[in-house]
Image: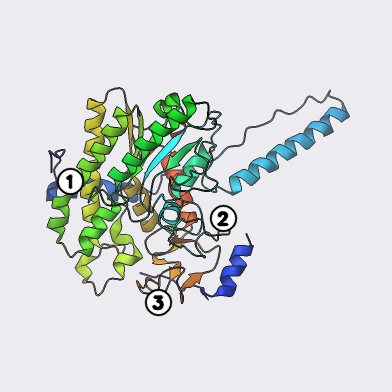
Amino acid sequence: MDYGQPQFNGGNKEEEERSGRQHEQRSPSFSADAELKSVVKCKVQTAIKDNNRKLPTTTIPSISVFSHMASLFFFFTFRRIRIGVFLLICIVLASFPYSVHCWCKNPPIIFNFGDSNSDTGGLVSGLGFQINLPNGRSFFRRSTGRLSDGRLILDFLCQSVNTSFLSPYMDSLGAIFSNGVNFAVVGSSTLPKFMPFALHIQVMQFVHFKERSIQLVAAGSRNLIGDEGFSNALYMIDIGQNDLADSFAKNLSYAQVVKRIPSIIFEIKNSIETIHAQGGRKFWVHNTGPLGCLPQKLSLGQKASNQLDEYGCLSGYDDAAVVFNEGLRHLCQELRSELKDATIVYVDIYSIKYDLIANYSKYGFSTPLMACCGFGGPPYNYDSKVTCGQPGYQVCSEGSKYVSWDGVHYTEAANSFIASKILSNEYSTPPIAFDYFCQ
């Protein structure tokens, strides 16, 4: 596989300043045997090889042509307005190159639970952990605590319904919680359930936030969420990747990793049921991506050819992700039957990401299995001793169309692409549009 030659810049202080200036209870039952895995992977491969699926496009509302009988004054006046509107729309769309435009007049309140894939600053605000440039260089022009060069999938989804980026729950300065809260923190998993900041802990934080917020609203506070807001809010869950990755990191066999999956699914079930008991009725659940395609995993020692699939990804890691995702899909189906007053949407992130890696050149990307920011050069540019933002790192040129940002997380360009696929509804079960949750 041709990984291409990256254009690297040394990670030095001058570069950073330049960038900164520029701006065991019963588990839900599901089959995890080889036959199930084979069927699911077959479906994924079929979807990937379907090259006729087109990206959702954004359309600009047409403006009717004035009658030839209109006066020249009105003709030129309205022509200026049309040009101004057109330019404004172009500016908005340029910041979201793959977006499906949305005219959401009443943005939903959003509560997000997850890990580094959706952490908008929780690790920094909660533990004071420093995430340095070049993280954040592409959009924010400064580090915001996100592990990417710019926006995350969550950020693009928020923009698609005209709401502000979510503030981390533990951000004590300048946080705005009127549009929701982000409880996600880097490194979070479902187990152990009482380990900061596991999913169970995040849900406990939400319960406390809800109780306190309602108390303050009743006492006359403004710009906080009331009881009705919590009932109408959208609850997003994107977690599970670290549970699988940590299991493999402990040298557990594939069979041992798969054996743990029902317990992971059970924790997600408990969390959804707890939020439902608190009045939540709208849920948006992401499955996990192809772990075996992450440069971090691929850089771990020598690999036999039979360990890699046709695209160069580690089959065992991806197989475990497929089994987890099938369990999560079954859980969502089961909860729809149990919680009949709830809307529960399951989103197949795995298929979107795997399709991007398999057909990267079709979508205008390069080197899908090599990190933009890291150390070591091809084929993976990842070294656990010199990670992105740490002394000695190397980073690709701005504007490069890499899929992986730091070996674990995705670039803003890739996140934008993934968000556009999510917004197409083709990967959602049931196929409900994200802007359906506009109030």
Q: Earlier in the sequence, mark 1 or mark 3?
A: 1
Q: Decide if residue 439 is in sight here.
A: no
29 vs 428, left or right, is left
- Work out how far the residue at label 2 is from the one at label 3, CA to CA, in angstroms: 26 Å
| Amino acid on which disc 2 is placed | Phe
Q: Secondary structure at mark 3?
A: loop
Q: Earlier in the sequence, mark 1 or mark 2?
A: 2
Residue placed under numbered mark 2 in the picture: 139
Find residue 263 and name its label: 1
- Is 71 located above or below residue 256 in the figure? above
Residue 172 picture location, percent across and down: 49, 48
Residue at 83% across / 24% down in the picture? 70
User: Which circle, 1 or 3, is nearer the viewer?
Assistant: 1
Quadrant showing the N terminus:
bottom left
Residue placed under numbered mark 3 in the picture: 376
Q: Secondary structure at mark 2?
A: loop
Q: Nearer the viewer, residue 395 or 219?
A: 219
Q: Earlier in the sequence, mark 2 or mark 3?
A: 2
Splitting the image into 4 quarters, where does residue 300 fall?
bottom left
| Amino acid on which disc 3 is placed | Gly
212 vs 277, left or right, is right
Q: Secondary structure at mark 1?
A: helix
